[in-house]
Image (cartoon, coloured by chain):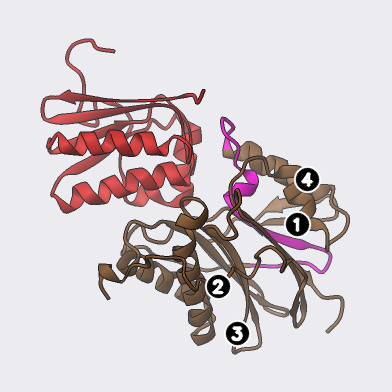
Chain colours: A brown, B red
Amino acid sequence: MTASDEPEAVDAAPLPSGAPGSDALEQVQGWDVAGRYRASGIAQVGGDWYDVVQVASGRVAVVIGDVSGRGAQAAPTMSRVRDAARRFLREDDDPAVTVARLNDLTVQLLPGQVVTALVALLDRTEGIRICSAGHLPPLTVDGTRTRYWDVAQGPALGLTPDAVYAVSHHALDRSATMVLYTDGLVERRGEPIDAGLERLARSGATASDFAALCDHLIGTVAAGDDDVAVVALRRKESG
Amino acid sequence: MLDFDVQVVGMGECTRVTVRGELDIATAPQLVEALTRAIEERQPRIVVDLLGTTFVDSTGLTTLFRAHKRLESQGRVLAIVCGSDNFEVRRVIDLMGFDEVFNIYETLASSGCEESGSAS
């Protein structure tokens, strides 16, 4: 692998899973998954993405990520990392293995690019396994109760070849919804990041309908013109 | 107007880049320009002073990271001054894991780039 293998153009870059017009509920066995993607400005694609991957073991992996920078400049890196994540997860569904491989790819083939990403592996009996590369923590909403999970954190992708990534285990109750999001949802100029996280938690506590949750959060929390990706998931009632 | 200002000052063996205000996707291009100038000064050490930086986002930190890598490949050093009392900026640095790659110092004195006289 060489540095000259960097992507140069957006040509043939497919839209992210959560591109405009594809905001329907994802059909995933055992789980309800809803996602929303909003690109900044007039761009169709940007640096944020989410993805839902049915892995070989019958489990489901959900990926969310954010390439530093905005709009079309970040899109080639986004599609590269997103596609690699799909491939890696199908080969080995351990979230930490995929994140470590994505870090190697970013360090070696996309030098200077910085990507935050979070991979969650869903298993209805074993719970949720998470590995985060510098990404913001998942929010869980259970009625009016909200909580941020303290997940295993390593550095953002691309920072160092010596990065170490671990997996943390979490239980998502039947009544609860997990929300993954990118920083465009919570960041506001001149405001501490924690104020944005508090605003997101407050908004999550007032949401009523799962199908409309992502729109509700974007409508009530997002301030700026940054790319935003949000994905919500919960256990299906049956099946 | 954006609340942002960046200054480059040569200080003997080091070049100091002082960043004030909000460093984000809108103001990062000004930092890129300032860092390019600082790198061209050819001093072995560039110290980026974030003591007066009130807000930083991933694009701002990525700008610093790219300068860090470029200097490192030249056998030079990028040092960052960000006191632990600058909680907002330090939180984003730590959250994204930049603390694992940056040389971070609490004060200008500890960064190896303290001014001897008074300057503004």
- Which three-letter amino acid code belongs to the residue tagged 4? Ser
- Between the C-alphas of marks 2 and 1, the distance is 22 Å
Disc 3 to disc 1: CB gap under 8 Å? no
Near mark 3 (Cα within 10 A), the count class, few <14, some 14-19 or many ≥20, is some
The answer to whether residue A195 is left or right of residue A32 is: left
Q: Residue A153: in sight, yes or no?
A: no
* Residue type of the residue flagged with mark 1: Cys
- Which chain is indicated by disc 4? A
Compared with B52, A223 (above or below) is below
Disc on res. A214: 1
User: Which mark, residue A14?
Assistant: 2
Residue A3 x/y as whole percent: 26, 67
Label 4, residues with CA under 10 Å away: few <14, some 14-19, many ≥20:
many
Q: Which residues are magenta?
A: A170-192
- Residue A55's label in the rendered image is 3
Q: Does dot 2 land on a helix, a strand or a loop?
A: loop
Question: Which type of secondary structure does the marked residue at label 4 adopt?
Answer: helix
Q: How would you rate the neighbour count of disc 1 (Cα within 10 Å): few for under 14, some for 14-19, many for 20 or more?
A: many
Residue A34 painted magenta: no
Confirm whether circles 3 and 2 share one chain: yes
| Secondary element at tag 1 | helix
SS of the residue at dot 3?
A: loop
**Observer-nearest of A175 and B65:** B65
State yes or no: residue A174 in magenta. yes
Disc number for residue A203 = 4
